Amino acid sequence: MRIALVADRSPGVRSHVRVPLLVEALREREGVALDAYWIPTADAAGDAGGLERFDGIWMLPGSPYRSEEGAVAAARTAREHGIPFLGTCGGFQHMLLEFARHVCGLEVAHAENEPGAREFLLTPLACSLAGHEEVVRLSAGSLIERIMGVRSSVEAYNCSYGLNPGYRRLLEERGLVFSGHADDGAVRVAELPSHPFFLATLFQPELSGDGRRAHPVIAAFAAAVAARAGSGGGRVAGWQGRGAPCGDVS
């Protein structure tokens, strides 16, 4: 079962350092063996990325990405091909950007990527969450609530941008569900019920604990990947992409 880790890998990004530990934890504790490959955002755009041949796509933090186009293309590939998708932090932001542009037809920008644009879907948070923990309230009956098994949880963040609330209703009207919120109602989780597994969190589940046990969100993503691989829906036989294996430190 192969998954694409879409991000511009850096030893300075804590979540990137955690991923090999989490992949091993999934193998040891959950019995799910994932073959994970790092795909730089610049390689994720167009047919050259080959992401449609993976069993899962996880878009990790690390924005601003080197290629916004590649990050958006990765989210679109997962959505259109029914590939299990998990977006965390920057992945959450760029999943929303893809949905707004290609499903809702909006000409909107990410304020971090295009500060001179006219319309912003992603704007600076009222208070930066970089290096903070915050309570997330989960909607009853949602995918994230079923995964977590609780109605609220304290989660780790390292971000400064979130959804412009002025666009929330339009995205909801086109099928996106906002299923996790801060105490003030600000969006923290988004999911797409019409998709086999399409979940994005502004918080970073990969930073939970010490890395020796996968957060429930990551374990659920891995289970969705296993289900797709078992059905033969996303085999990567003969894949010859340029991504580096998860454990490759080069």
Image (tube, rainbow, N blue to C red):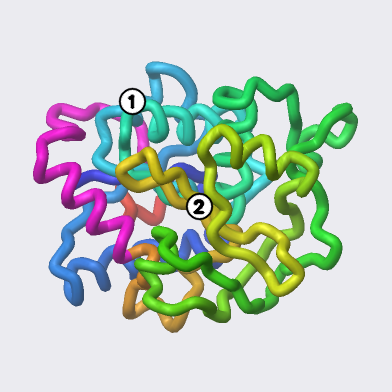
Q: Residue at x 69, y 44 (%)?
A: 168
Please tell me which residue is depicted at 65% across the width and 47% down the height of the picture.
63
For mark 2, does the 10 Å Cα neighbourhood hold few (<14), some (14 to 19), or many (20 or more) residues?
many
In the image, taking residue 195 as reference, residue 151 lies left or right, namely: right
Mark 1 or mark 2: name the one nearer the start of the chain: 1
**Label drawn at residue 200:** 2
Badge 1: residue crowd in 10 Å (few <14, some 14–19, many ≥20): many
Query: What residue is rendered at 45% in x and 18% in y?
Result: 46
Q: In the image, is residue 31 above or below residue 88?
A: below
Which residues fall within the magenta stretch?
Answer: 219-243
Q: Residue at x 42, y 39 (%)?
A: 39
Vertical relation: 198 (above or below) 43: below
Q: Is residue 232 magenta?
A: yes
Image height of 222 relative to 68, above or below: below
Q: Secondary structure at mark 2?
A: strand
Residue 111 falls left or right of residue 59: right
What type is the residue that disc 2 sits on? Ala
Element marked by disc 1: loop
Looking at the picture, how far across and down is residue 197, in whole percent? 34, 47
Magenta stretch encompasses residue 233: yes
Q: Nearer the viewer, mark 1 or mark 2?
A: 2
Q: Amino acid at mark 1?
A: Gly
- Point out residue 209 in the picture as x, y percentages from the top left corner: 45, 82
State the CA–CA distance, disc 1 to disc 2. Answer: 22 Å
Q: Give the percent coordinates (x, y) of residue 89.
A: 59, 56
Q: Position of residue 95 (x, y in %)?
A: 55, 40
- Disc 1: which residue: 50
In-front residue for pair 151/106: 151
